[in-house]
């Protein structure tokens, strides 16, 4: 017999639905109501049982008969002259209480002295039936996440050395050298055009176009905010703000001022969007705001840049990648020449890259370019390292180890100790595991496709 959930009714209610008119109620007098006798066979049951919803149920002992052993001849079928309180009258159409006239006094008695056996008589009794299972949803969440826009500011060194120093840009001694600014202008505008549709790009230069080639603070003039604030489709604006490829640049290297101006803009970006900087330079920083005189301003290394980059990362989750353009890996001489004394730009750029939160693997932590082709590739890689390869999950996983990240049909592995500069996969980037960062091939796929599926708590 299949299992079923049955609510036990009073015997008078059972009589309303009796489907076997041949059952003799005297055969079951005194039996416990609610006793089950198996399934109905062609609408009939063994003697003493009535067919209720195709189940044979004993109707005796309830309000349909005399519980005190009174007149046993009372017909539970309810003849025309029967007591309407004894149950329904014969017929197939009954009113709310079982009376075909709609008399609500017919049907089960509400007399609390009537004992219908051990079964409960209330449909609301929690012990009668177990609660129905409605298929409550589990914790599995299938998240379809788009690449969030990144507010990215290129913090660009436009000091005089970029236009006065030339380099072998193509590795061919048979072609004339070009200025480093000419190569940077070409490669930077190309990279900007590649990412402008998805990400908000801006430009901050140090020093500004107003800087002079002078042994004074005039060489350190820098705007307090970006020349171009981050926005989508900003390639034309950035291209117009950059000095032309053949420009003769002037000024020193006030890197700290440039970084501070960029951060002042990024701090106002929406918190739901990623924020980042790409720092590009060709020498060690000077122009400290605390310098006591011109010599201290131009001949002393400004180490405040490390605190600015490190604080942006540790306090505000603003990453900085660092690109060097043909840096000399040596310590400068002590000369009155407007350059920091006894400073090695490679050492300084390595520190900045580590403090910025996006260092490269290996001994050199920044993107070290020595020709134009390498500069273009490094700029692109530096941008990708800072762009929106972080996804906010919106929820906190119950079991962080079963999260699955799928991009373009490929599942990428979770690697708790992944070096993003060297490996593929993804890692959590915050304490409650509600944000992930995709690395290597996973990041490339995300930036190309524009989105990913993340399955959370789907074991």
Image (cartoon, rainbow, N blue to C red):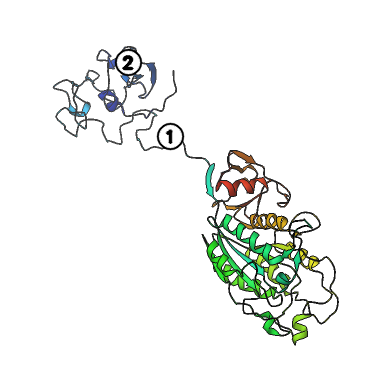
The answer to whether 122 appears left or right of 318 in the picture is left
**CB atoms of marks 2 and 1 within 8 Å:** no
The answer to whether 162 appears left or right of 363 in the picture is left
In the rendered image, the quadrant that contains the C terminus is top right
Residue 237, horizontal then vertical, whole percent:
53, 66
Q: 215 or 362, which is in the foreground?
A: 215
Q: Residue at x 21, y 25 (%)?
A: 88
**Which residue lies under the disc numbered 2?**
48
Can you say whether 157 is above or below 131 in the image? below
Q: Quadrant of residue 157?
A: bottom right
Q: Residue at x 16, y 32 (%)?
A: 102
**Which residue lies under the disc numbered 1?**
132
Residue 398 showing in the rendered view: no
Residue 291, horizontal then vertical, whole percent:
74, 84
Q: Quadrant of residue 129?
A: top left
Mark 2 to mark 1 CA distance (whole Å): 31 Å
For marks 2 and 1 on the same chain, the one whose residue lies earlier in the sequence? 2
Residue 349 showing in the rendered view: yes
Q: Secondary structure at mark 1?
A: loop
Residue 457, horizontal then vertical, whole percent:
58, 43
How dense is the environment of label 1, judged by Cα within 10 Å: few (below 14), some, or many (20 and up)? few
How dense is the environment of label 2, judged by Cα within 10 Å: few (below 14), some, or many (20 and up)? many
Can you say whether 81 is above or below 436 in the image? above
Residue 324, horizontal then vertical, whole percent:
73, 63
Q: 309 or 315, which is in the foreground?
A: 309
Q: Secondary structure at mark 2?
A: loop
Q: Residue at x 46, y 36 (%)?
A: 135
Count the labels in the image: 2
* 2 vs 1, front mark: 1
Can you say whether 63 is above or below 360 in the image? above
Q: 69 or 11, which is in the foreground?
A: 11
């Amino acid at each position: 017999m299949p299992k079923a959930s049955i609510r036990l009714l009073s015997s008078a209610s059972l009589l309303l639905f009796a489907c076997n008119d041949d059952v003799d109620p005297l055969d079951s007098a005194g039996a416990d109501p609610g006793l089950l006798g198996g399934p109905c066979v062609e609408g009939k049951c063994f003697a003493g049982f009535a067919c209720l919803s195709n189940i044979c149920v004993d109707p005796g002992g309830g309000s349909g008969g005399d519980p005190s052993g009174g007149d046993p001849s009372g017909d539970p079928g309810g003849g025309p002259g029967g007591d309407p309180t004894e149950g329904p009258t014969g017929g197939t159409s009954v009113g709310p209480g079982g009376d075909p006239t709609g008399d609500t006094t017919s049907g089960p008695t509400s007399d609390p002295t009537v004992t219908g056996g051990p079964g409960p008589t209330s449909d609301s009794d929690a012990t009668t039936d177990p609660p129905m299972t409605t298929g409550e949803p589990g914790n599995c969440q299938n998240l379809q996440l788009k690449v969030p826009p990144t507010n990215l500011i290129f913090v660009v060194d436009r000091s005089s050395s970029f236009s006065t120093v030339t380099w072998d840009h193509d590795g061919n001694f048979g072609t004339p050298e070009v200025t480093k600014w000419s190569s940077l202008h070409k490669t930077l505008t190309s990279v900007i055009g590649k990412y402008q549709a998805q990400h908000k790009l801006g430009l901050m230069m140090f020093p500004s176009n107003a800087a002079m080639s002078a042994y004074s603070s005039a060489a350190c003039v820098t705007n307090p905010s970006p020349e171009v604030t981050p926005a989508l489709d900003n390639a034309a604006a950035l291209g117009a703000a950059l000095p032309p490829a053949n420009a003769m640049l002037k000024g020193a290297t006030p890197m700290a001022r440039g970084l501070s101006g960029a951060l002042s803009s990024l701090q106002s970006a929406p918190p739901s969007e990623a924020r980042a900087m790409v720092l590009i330079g060709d020498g060690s920083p000077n122009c400290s705001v605390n310098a006591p005189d011109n010599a201290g301003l131009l001949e002393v290394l400004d180490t405040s840049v490390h605190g600015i980059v490190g604080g942006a990362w540790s306090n505000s989750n603003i990453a900085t990648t660092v690109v060097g353009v043909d840096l000399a890996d040596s310590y400068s001489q002590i000369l009155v020449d407007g350059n920091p004394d006894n400073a090695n730009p490679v050492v300084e750029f390595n520190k900045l890259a580590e403090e910025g939160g996006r260092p490269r693997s290996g001994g050199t932590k920044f993107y070290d370019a020595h020709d134009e082709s390498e500069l273009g590739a490094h700029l692109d890689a530096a941008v990708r390292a800072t762009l929106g390869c972080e996804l906010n999950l919106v929820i906190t996983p119950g079991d962080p180890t079963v999260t699955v990240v799928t991009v373009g049909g490929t599942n990428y592995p979770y690697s708790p100790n992944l070096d993003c500069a060297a490996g593929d996969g993804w890692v959590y980037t915050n304490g409650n595991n509600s944000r992930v960062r995709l690395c290597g091939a996973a990041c490339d796929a995300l930036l190309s496709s524009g989105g990913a599926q993340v399955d959370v708590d789907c074991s």
